């Protein structure tokens, strides 16, 4: 009867030939076959396979040579991993991962696509929506925040770029950590950082602290994109992956629409706030910043009720936890389909060989911060190793090609997204200047000005014994004029200057006509009393409604592209979707030469955004599918971080040509899109492969 192990153990289950085998007597049975009777060997016509299924006509008297080798291999003494070459361990791990990839695909298909995936879809969608909101927040609050904080042009430019800088760092750092600490845990950290510092930024008064809060807030939200797509893809089967990841991208569009609608409904109501003394002001734009943090907070709360990715857990050897989550997914979907009696048939899932070096630090070793320092440095080293792994021979070419495609797409898209509103504002300024009124050699005496003067030029005028009380100058210039015995009281001004004027015996009381507004003027016996307090910078009067409308229409215009890309992603393929979308977007850029009005620019912006969104969606999908589970979020984070570098360069380059020429931005955007689109066609197609 073979041999018996006389040491009884508490666990009656033993793993044999890929299955768990139970013995009621508590003894372990070895792999040797019991001796068979000679007659029995010749008469056997029925036998049992590994799953105890009976096959007629199968002769089993003489075992197959491969079966003998396999059993001898199992009886051979195991060699400790510490004595094995690391290359052998990695080769074994790669083989295990390939087996796991195909088994996991079958398991996900058995679990089905239903209530669980749709619940996770909306939870992660809120996180992606928070990312979309973050891109628009600073642009919407700048016209109001610049007045409260007295921001110069360079300060405003830095505030716009600092968010992208934070998102770049966050994508690389938090994306890398998600491959080591887990998708759910790192996404919670990412959203918590964003929510905390977005909330804090709405209350701070100083520019420096506000800049710091937006930087850290951007760092937090930067990690959401690589984690969200990696997380959701690991609950999707191959046939559903492309379509549903594309549907998930719609939440970025919803974030833009949400930000535009909230800005239009909140920021113009300047009285929605409060003041504490003369130093602390909480105006409506700060209320808007608070409201924009709501999607992030909602996702953070909902995420607490979602499980970790079972694919990630299997990757780090946590078989039982992964099995329980997959059973939860299966049971949730089956109950929703009205089939609660369906049983989850998976009993064992392959787990890859663990080759990472873990350092266990005892509580008595060193101080608490030394222990934490060792853990942090070890984790960061593992993240850095993952980054370098993406550049190894196996993935180098795909990584470099994807990097170029991501960069060219971001340079063109984010550059034009900033360029469109700036061009619309430029057209508005041109139209405004064309309506300027010019007054030459006018003489006014003993007159009281108590109304607004706007968009006027006064040349060689004479003003004697006139009063300017409780009024406003807006875009007014006085050139080579004389003011004698005049009185200015409670006067406000913007973009108003006195050039080469002579001002005699004139009093300025409680005005904001500061010294820099008098250019080459002669002031004789004139007095400035009680100047208005506050910022001395003149700010442009922006048409807030038009800014919100342009952003709203730009976000809404991607809806058709989102729907088309979702429906065709698995039919057309990722590569053709990226190449086709980028080439069509390049053609749209050439139509911008005919955009000579506000309405034309808005129309071409909507067309460009609608054409380019399919490329973004396909890029997200193919980036997820090209890399293995333990490198997926890291690779996505690297590429998304490079995307933010392209965004920063695009914003800086394109905005510098506003009002100078349209040729450079249009040619730069179109050539980048053509180059990136053609290179994308050389990437491998991934729609038929399982998730490694």
Image (spheres, rainbow, N blue to C red):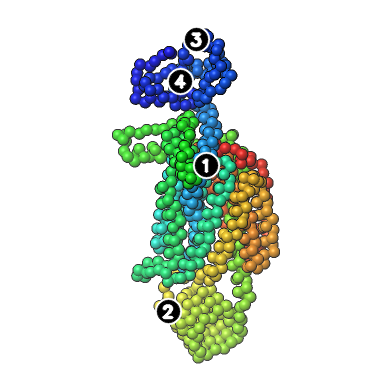
Q: Residue 190 location, x and y as percent?
A: 44, 49
Sooner in the amino-acid sequence: mark 1 or mark 4: 4
Q: Residues within 10 Å of mark 3 (few under 14, many from 20)?
A: few
At mark 2, the secondary structure is loop
**Mark-to-mark CA distance, 1 and 4:** 40 Å
**Mark-to-mark CA distance, 1 and 2:** 73 Å
Sooner in the amino-acid sequence: mark 3 or mark 4: 3
**Mark-to-mark CA distance, 1 and 3:** 48 Å
Decide: is 650 above or below 233.
below
Q: Residue at x 43, y 17 (%)?
A: 30
Marks 3 and 2 close (CB-CB < 8 Å): no
Q: Residue at x 41, y 48 (%)?
A: 304
Q: Is residue 86 visible?
A: no
Q: Residue 224 location, x and y as percent?
A: 48, 49
Q: Residue at x 55, y 47 (%)?
A: 245
Position of the N terminus by quadrant: top left
Q: Is residue 38 visible?
A: yes
Marks 1 and 2 close (CB-CB < 8 Å): no
Mark 1 vs mark 4: give the one in front.
Answer: 1
Q: Which residue is mark 4?
A: 79
- Numbered tag placed on residue 112 in the rendering: 1
**Mark-to-mark CA distance, 3 and 4:** 36 Å
- Numbered tag placed on residue 37 in the rendering: 3
**Mark-to-mark CA distance, 4 and 2:** 89 Å
Q: Residue at x 40, y 58 (%)?
A: 200
Mark 1 vs mark 2: give the one in front.
Answer: 1
Q: Residues within 10 Å of mark 1 (few under 14, many from 20)?
A: many
Q: Residue 648 location, x and y as percent?
A: 55, 54
At mark 4, the secondary structure is loop
Sooner in the amino-acid sequence: mark 4 or mark 2: 4
- Numbered tag placed on residue 510 in the rendering: 2
Q: Residue 45 location, x and y as percent?
A: 56, 16
């Amino acid at each position: 009867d073979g041999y018996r192990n006389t040491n009884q153990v508490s666990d009656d289950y033993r793993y044999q030939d890929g299955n768990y085998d139970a013995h009621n007597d508590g003894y372990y049975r070895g792999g040797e076959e019991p001796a068979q009777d000679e007659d029995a060997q010749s008469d056997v016509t029925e036998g049992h396979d590994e799953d105890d299924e009976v096959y007629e006509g199968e002769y089993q008297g003489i075992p197959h040579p491969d079966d003998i080798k396999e059993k001898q291999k199992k009886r051979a003494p195991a060699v400790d991993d510490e004595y094995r070459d690391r290359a052998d361990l990695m080769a074994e791990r790669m083989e295990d991962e390939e087996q796991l990839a195909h088994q996991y695909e079958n398991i996900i298909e058995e679990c089905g696509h239903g209530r669980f995936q749709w619940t996770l879809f909306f939870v992660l969608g809120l996180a992606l929506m928070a990312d979309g909101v973050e891109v628009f927040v600073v642009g919407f609050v700048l016209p109001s925040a610049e007045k409260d904080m007295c921001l110069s042009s360079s300060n405003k430019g830095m505030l716009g770029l600092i968010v992208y800088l934070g998102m770049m760092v966050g994508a690389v750092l938090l994306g890398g950590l998600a491959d080591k600490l887990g998708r759910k845990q790192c996404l919670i950290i990412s959203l918590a950082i964003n929510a905390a510092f977005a909330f804090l930024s709405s209350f701070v008064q100083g520019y420096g602290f506000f800049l710091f809060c937006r930087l850290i807030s951007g760092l937090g939200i930067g990690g959401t994109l690589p984690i969200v797509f990696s997380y959701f893809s690991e609950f999707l089967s191959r046939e559903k992956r492309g379509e549903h990841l594309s549907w998930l991208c719609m939440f970025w569009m919803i974030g833009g629409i949400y930000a535009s609608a909230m800005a239009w409904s909140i920021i113009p109501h300047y009285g929605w706030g409060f003041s504490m003394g003369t130093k602390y002001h909480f105006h409506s734009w700060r209320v808007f910043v608070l409201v924009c943090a709501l999607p992030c907070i909602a996702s953070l709360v909902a995420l607490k009720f979602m499980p970790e990715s079972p694919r990630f857990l299997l990757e780090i050897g946590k078989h039982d936890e992964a099995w329980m989550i997959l059973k939860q997914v299966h049971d949730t979907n089956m109950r929703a389909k009205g089939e609660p009696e369906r049983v989850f048939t998976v009993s064992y899932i392959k787990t890859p060989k663990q080759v990472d070096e873990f350092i266990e630090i005892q509580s008595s070793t060193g101080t608490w911060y030394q222990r934490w320092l060792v853990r942090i440095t070890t984790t960061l080293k593992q993240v850095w190793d993952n980054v370098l792994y993406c550049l190894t021979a196996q993935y180098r070419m795909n990584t470099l090609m994807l990097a170029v495609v991501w960069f060219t797409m971001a340079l063109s898209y984010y550059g034009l997204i900033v360029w469109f509103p700036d061009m619309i504002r430029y057209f508005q300024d041109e139209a405004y200047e064309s309506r300027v009124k010019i007054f030459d050699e006018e003489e006014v005496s003993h007159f009281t000005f108590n109304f607004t003067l706007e968009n006027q030029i006064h040349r060689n005028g004479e003003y004697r014994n006139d009063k300017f009380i409780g009024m406003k100058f807006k875009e007014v210039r006085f050139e080579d004029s004389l003011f004698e015995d005049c009185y200015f009281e409670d006067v406000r001004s913007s973009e108003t200057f006195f050039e080469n004027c002579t001002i005699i015996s004139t009093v300025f009381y409680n005005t904001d006509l500061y010294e820099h507004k008098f250019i080459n003027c002669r002031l004789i016996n004139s007095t400035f009393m009680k100047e208005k307090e506050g910022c001395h910078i003149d700010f442009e009067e922006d048409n807030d409604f038009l800014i919100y409308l342009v952003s709203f229409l730009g976000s809404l215009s991607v809806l058709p592209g989102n729907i088309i890309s979702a429906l065709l992603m698995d039919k057309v393929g990722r590569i053709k979707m990226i190449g086709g979308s980028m080439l069509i977007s390049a053609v749209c850029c050439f139509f911008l030469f005919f955009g000579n009005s506000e309405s034309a620019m808005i129309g071409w912006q909507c067309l460009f955004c609608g054409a380019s969104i399919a490329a973004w969606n396909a890029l997200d999908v193919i980036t997820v599918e090209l890399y293995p589970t333990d490198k997926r979020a890291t690779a996505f984070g690297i590429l998304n971080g490079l995307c933010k570098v392209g965004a920063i360069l695009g914003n800086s380059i394109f905005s510098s040509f506003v009002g100078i020429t349209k040729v450079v931005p249009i040619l730069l955007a179109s050539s980048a899109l053509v180059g990136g689109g053609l290179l994308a066609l050389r990437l491998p197609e991934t729609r038929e492969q399982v998730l490694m």
